[in-house]
Image (cartoon, rainbow, N blue to C red):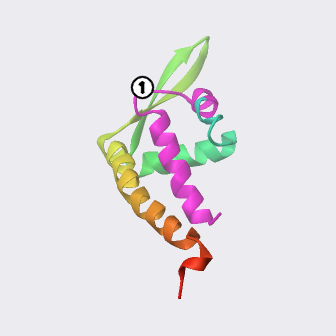
Amino acid sequence: MDIQLKRGLLDVCVLAAIKNEDSYGYKIIKDLKPYVELSESTLYTILKRLEAANMLTVRSTEHAGRLRKYYHITRAGVGRIEDFKDEWKEVVSIYHFVSKEEGNHA
């Protein structure tokens, strides 16, 4: 898969994982596991990129004697998910065009 396409898909997956409630790294990886394999290093790179783009905010809270970072989606992050849904309709349309039966052309 094209690296830029995959990067965009992973960004949206991470945003979707925190859309309904704030979450932390390990839980995000666990929530995404049925859909996509994501390493910790990849996740934290994505989280930093999304924070820099103002699509999420971060707060630290003590948990079991350690600081845990919680990630919260912003309005821009929700907007990115909505943009992705609209864009995906076009991608699906292109996929159907590209994958249609070969016998259908003149």
Q: Does residue 4 sit above or below 72 in this rendering?
A: below
Say which residue appears at 59% left-offset and 58% top-offset: 6
Which residue corresponds to the image point at 37% horizontal and 50% vertical from the top-left? Answer: 80
Q: What segment carries the magenta color?
A: 1-30
Mark 1 secondary-structure assignment: loop
Most foreground residue, 82 or 70: 82
Q: Position of residue 58 (x, y in %)?
A: 44, 34
Residue 106 x/y as whole percent: 53, 88
The question of residue 27 being in magenta is answered with yes
- Horizontally, residue 98 falls left or right of residue 18, namely right
Tell me: residue 59, above or below residue 1.
above
**Displayed quadrant of residue 93:** bottom left
Residue 5: percent from left, percent from top: 55, 62
Q: Tell me the residue that label 1 is attached to.
A: 21
Quarter of the image with the N terminus in it? bottom right
Q: Residue at x 50, y 27 (%)?
A: 23
Q: Residue at x 46, y 41 (%)?
A: 15
